[in-house]
Amino acid sequence: MEQLRKVGDWLWRNKEKMVLAGLVLVLIYQVYKVKFAPPEAEEDGPRFVLPSGSVRDTITELPPPPPSDPDRPDTKRLVRSNPFSAIGLGGDNLDEDGQAQPELELLKIMPWTGGTFVAEIRTQTARPKRYGVGDQFESYRIISIDPSAKEVVVYSEEHRKNFTFTVE
């Protein structure tokens, strides 16, 4: 009777280890099944073949899409951009080549110390900030500021080209 009690105590103290060992054995078995699974017999054709003269043979092209309903309200204004992403898709903001332009807004150009100029720019994700020539922000870099034409040339690392913005 004493030996049976000792075995019971040992099992009670080591129950977590036994459950862990059982789970490890199940994992090893599942890995073995995946790794050394017998190859399935490959068939030369599809598993299910439609009989000849069926619907598949009579349809030659897809039907046209349904016409748009003029009474249906415009739902594009209900879609908002993700506030957690720094770069949006910007499908409406296209330049003359059909390429997407950066979502930047040039607010004003101001004189700065030492006879230089800074541009106040608002990005899609931040409040307006002032940037001088050579300054980098997000994925952009200021190339030049022309106060007489009120233009700023910005290089976009995402698009890998220069964009010109004017004060509106």
Image (tube, rainbow, N blue to C red):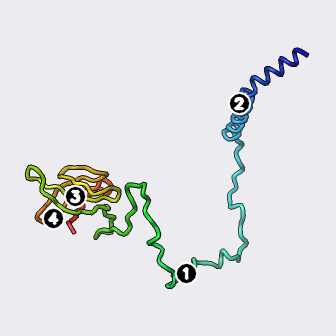
Can you tell which mark lies on residue 66? Answer: 1
Q: Quadrant of residue 1?
A: top right
Which dot, 3 or 2, sits closer to the camera? 3
Amino acid on which disc 3 is placed: Glu
- In terms of sequence position, does the residue under pointer 1 or pointer 4 come before the other? 1
Can you tell which mark lies on residue 120? Answer: 3
Q: CA distance from mark 1 to mark 4?
A: 48 Å
Q: Residue furthest bottom?
A: 70
Q: Quadrant of residue 21?
A: top right
Q: Position of residue 54 (x, y in %)?
A: 70, 76
The residue under label 2 is 20
Give the position of the C terminus as an image quadrant. Answer: bottom left
Which dot, 3 or 4, sits closer to the camera? 3
Q: CA distance from mark 3 to mark 4?
A: 12 Å
The residue under label 4 is 150
Which dot, 1 or 3, sits closer to the camera? 3
Q: Are marks 1 and 4 in contact (CB under 8 Å)?
A: no
